[in-house]
Amino acid sequence: MNRVLPWLLVTPAILAIVVLLVLPLLDTISVTFIQEEGVFAGYQEFFDRRFNRGVLWRTVRIALIVTAIAIAIGFPTAYFIARAPRSWRSILIVASVFPLLTSTVVRSFAWIVILGRNGIINETLMGLGLISEPLSMLYTEGAIIVGLAYLFSPLMILSLVGVLENIDKSVVEASISLGASPAKTFWRVILPLAMPGVIVGAVLVFTGSFTSYTTPVLLGGQRNTVLATLLFREAMTEFDWASASTIAVIMMALTITVVLIMSRVARRLNPAAA
Amino acid sequence: MQRSSPILAITAIAVFIFLLGPLVIVAAASISNTEFLAFPPQGFSLRWFVNVFEVSAFRDTFLISLQIALLGTFLSLLIGIPAAYALSRSGFTLPKSLANFFVLPILVPQIVFGFALLSAISVDFDLPVFPTLLIGHTIIVLPYSIRVVGASLATFDFSAEEAAISLGCPPVKTFYTIVLPNIRGGILAAFILAFITSLNNVPVSLFLTGPGISTLPIQMLTYVENFFDPTVAALSVLLMALTVLVMAVVEKTLGLGYFVR
Amino acid sequence: MTKSLNLTGISAHYGRTQVLKDLDLDVKAGELVSLLGASGCGKTTTLRLIAGFLHATAGRVALDGRDISSVAAHRRDIGLVFQNYALFPHMSVADNVGFGLKQRGVAPSERRARVGDMLEKVGLAAFADRLPAALSGGQKQRVALARALVIKPSLLLFDEPLSNLDAKLRVDMRVEIRELQRVHNITAIYVTHDQEEAFSISDRVAIMDAGQISQYDTPEVLYRKPANAFVANFVGFETMIGLRVTGRSGGVATAEGQGARFTLDEATWGGLPDAFTLGARADGLRVMEGGEDDGLPAKLSVRTYLGRSYHYRAETSVGSVVANGSIDRPFNEGDRAKLVLVPEQCCILPAQP
């Protein structure tokens, strides 16, 4: 191919992203800095309100806890899948992919059925006579965390299965032959080699949880506002587009910062790929 | 590898119950003969499945979602396949960072993108709801088209293309007769991934619904916020059945494709 | 119709790096010429340039005197055989072979006949309906060969066609390639980094280095009379000794330098310049007792047994060299000896600056 043709072939995709994604975003960003009261007035106002600071902290807190849970349950599961016989492995991977292909509304809705007043947990506990009144588990921060952990664990599992499968079996055998116990081998050989996968998974889970809308709306109710629901409320209920834009920029800035930092960490942890 | 320890196996089984159990519970709740969500289901009734088709909002929004997903996926492949081809074919001419640039639609929080589309395009240019939705969905599935087709192209040996040209086949015809048939599995996979992603999308569509136009997930969200009957459970079962069907098609087609290769 | 190929003043660049420098190459009609060299020497670039997949920054490519530099790759009528076969994975063997005929608008009935004929020739008639994935490496390469030959191209190009095959098959296949090329009387360019392969198969070989042709001649000349140190080294003259003639009498010259002294019969070399470099293969240096007048003084180290002779690693004033010794008189490690010349395994090169 010559020099012009490749550029010609990528031009439609570049144009689409620049015109339909980058420019609208730049427009949104510029709105937040063009304020009568000063360049940073919008951000000043946002952070001055205790409620907003609380929402931001709740969103970060939820995303961090969900990421930790996803790693904790994702790693052993991925390890199990990577070690399973071939035929089983594909079944287990399909079982992990299936939830991802199912609507987030459906998957969040499932937890209404489970956690609700007449849900499976309350019915079981009352049936056993352990409680007399249904517990209110729905519309709590805990419900959001469970829902998001459920939503995003498959992403963590799939990120990890990829790296764990690629770890050369003979490296593990070399470690054991050199006298390292299986536990030591895990901590000193397998975990460091799997670290890039952990980081990719963590970025996906954290940013996904941090910006999620559906699950907090369905499982968090009115009281447990997060950034995404606040953004929607400011834009569509209060019609305060300046505030909504400010929230949008804060979400975007935090997300991109996390992605950039973590990808740098991943690169440093993985000298083999450099 | 060595045998897994029983603790590991039990943990993994528990996780899979956690992953798949809720979906089973939704399915069970959909046949309950009660006016509210109940598990285990009380009685047996298919009336909530009937109700899905009687709520006209579900039918209308499903059709809109279907149109948006099909058109958006088609458009994303239309601009994504040439881009993926150029990226894997001309590594020298094109800057490496271009591949990263094409991930941008995944990097930007979708709810932020949805809001930006609303304020910058829908309002500023007074664009109707449907085309704005279509733009949003095309952009968010574009990275899937480029990456999945790109992965397929990465396994394709481009010297076959040169062989065809040396045998007298013009370059454009070579693309259709030699390259395309060999990446059709990747294109199908990209199509399905993009289609499902678009069909399930909430955050981009959230701001882009208007009078008479909404998407199915948004409609379901609204319904669940207001009603507690098992209709959405029944609808969920139907959607899951669609997903299973699609996965079976992939398995069958791609399986055949790999067999042929 | 067999055609000649002429490359004149070809230069090529990848970005700012120049990969071919003012290269000339003349190939006579019906000849098989190998481009031989290490990776990065420009041999594959030259081939792709002839095929039309790359464009030269200067110079012209001519087939039978007609400049084809600006002819598109798919109109050049050149058969190409790739290192990785480059078969179309989604087409049967017969469809692969028939592809070029189809592009040329050959009618289906004639196409079938010619494909069948060609598959017969490469011994794959029974595999016509198979897909490439079901073939072995050697069979794949035969299909690739058939596919390139069936269009009766003006020129056949081979890009390291045998490097993915095992050693035994490689030898069989190169005979087969040579035979088919002869029978069809097609001018051919063959790119390889394997010296034995190039020498065994070619009418002439161009040894390439850093984007230029170092020497272009028949294998016999290259093997015996390399023109420069690079070619000499490439064809196995590993030891280089800088010498100066110190005396001539009765057709015999005495040459000295770098601690060595040799008496050379001028007729053997067709005359000797006053200063020159002598190149020697391992078999060109023979280990003798230390008492000899002539020779290169050496201290022997590792000895390896080769059946007909011994090879020794020897420390000398020109460095560590390999020399050969009689099976009847083994030397021990640490022995001092003289290395004398076996003229047939030596060559004379211009003096190195």
Image: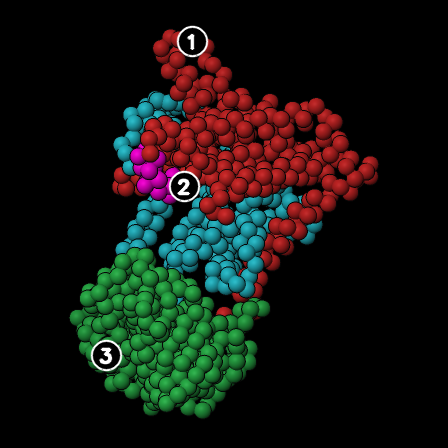
Chain colours: A red, B cyan, C green
Q: CA distance from mark 1 to mark 3?
A: 85 Å
Where is residue C14? Give x, y as percent.
53, 69
Residue occupied by mark 2? A163
Q: Which chain is home to disc 3?
A: C
Circles 3 and 2 on the same chain: no
Residue A183: in sight, yes or no? yes
Q: Residue at x 50, y 39 (%)?
A: A269
Q: Is residue B108 above or below residue B225?
A: below
**In the image, what residue type sits under mark 1?**
Ile
Which residue carries the number 3 mark? C118
Q: Is residue A125 above or below residue A76?
A: above
Q: What separation in Å lies between label 2 and label 1 (alpha carbons)?
A: 45 Å
Numbered label tally:
3
Image spot of residue C119 (x, y percent): 22, 76
Does the magenta run of residues contain A107? Answer: no
The range drawn in magenta is: A162-177
- Circle nearer the viewer, 1 or 3: 3
Q: Quadrant of residue C298?
A: bottom left
- Residue B258 location in percent, x, y? 30, 55
The three-letter amino acid code for the residue at tag 3 is Met
Which secondary structure is most common in the magenta stretch? helix
Pointer 2 chain: A
Name the image quarter holding residue C240: bottom left
Q: Does the segment drawn in magenta span residue A164?
A: yes
SS state under label 2: helix
- How packed mark 2 is, by other alpha carbons closer than 10 Å (few <14, some 14-19, many 20 or more), is some
